[in-house]
Image (cartoon, rainbow, N blue to C red):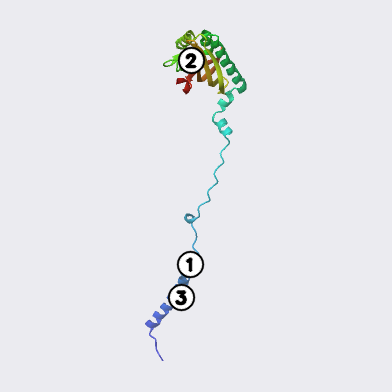
Amino acid sequence: MTVTSPIRAGLMAWAIAAIGVLSPIAADAATASKAKPIQTAALATEPRPMPKPTPPPASAVIAAVAPSALAGARAFDPNQVKSEIDAALASWAWSLNSGQQGIVVTNMYGNDAIMMSDDADGVMFNNGGIVRYYGNLVAQRPDLKVTFGDGWITVLGPDVGTATGFYTFAYTEKGREVSVPARYTLIYRKTSDGWRIVSHHSSRMPQAHS
């Protein structure tokens, strides 16, 4: 019969008790290591991008940006404006063909009109320059006539428009008939006195220079 000393018996009892306490802890740790990790907010997937907004129609943008401008816009008939400019251009030609350069300048051009022509150097203003130009033109060529070819009128508003096209000047020089084809651009502005030319550019066609 083996006799166990009290000290040895106490150590064995303590070891058995420690094993009993640590075993559940080890088992819980093993279970936790096999468990699926919890996804945190930092690891969450990115949200899908939102679709791009559809832009509003252009009319809505204009109304939002400048409602006062739209409210103040004046309705007009482009065809009526075009007819009035065409009539003013015909009056210019009739006055010039009649040798009435005074009427041309007084009734056809605005007070602030500008004119450029390859018949004259520099820019002419209606502070005397345009008057002198037509005076010299008719004095040198008393039988001067102008006829219109193809032309276009562009309406820019109820009070502004342009006339662009071709015309031909004809006159007699030293007993010989001279014909000078040219092109023109006129800017018209409507005033209280009617339509007036505020800018006139005239130049000969390239073949007319030869």
SS at circle 2 = strand
- Separation of marks 3 and 2 at Cα, in angstroms: 114 Å
Q: Earlier in the sequence, mark 2 or mark 1?
A: 1
Quadrant of the rendering where the C terminus is positioned: top left
Residue 80 is situated, as x and y percent measured from the top left of the image, at 62, 20
One can see residue 169 in this view? yes
Residue at the spot of label 1: 32
Q: Given the image, on which type of amino acid does mark 3 rest?
A: Gly
One can see residue 194 in this view? no
Q: Where is 58 relative to 4, above or below? A: above
Pick the residue in front: 185 or 2. Answer: 185
**How packed is label 3: few (under 14 Cα within 10 Å), some, or many (20 or more)?**
few
Q: Given the image, on which type of amino acid does mark 1 rest?
A: Ala
Which mark's residue is nearer the viewer, 3 or 1? Answer: 1
Residue drawn at (45%, 11%), measured in percent from left and top? 129
Q: Given the image, on which type of amino acid does mark 2 rest?
A: Ala
Q: Where is 32 relative to 166, above or below? A: below
Q: Which residue of the protein is positioned furthest toward the front in this rendering?
A: 175
Q: Quadrant of residue 14?
A: bottom left
Q: Is residue 82 left or right of residue 1?
A: right
Which mark's residue is nearer the viewer, 2 or 1? Answer: 2
Pick the residue in front: 2 or 145. Answer: 145
Residue 66 is situated, as x and y percent measured from the top left of the image, at 55, 28
Q: Where is 29 relative to 77, above or below? A: below
Labels 3 and 1 touching (C-beta < 8 A): no
Residue at the spot of label 3: 20
Q: Earlier in the sequence, mark 3 or mark 1?
A: 3
- Separation of marks 3 and 1 at Cα, in angstroms: 20 Å
Q: Is residue 48 left or right of residue 12?
A: right
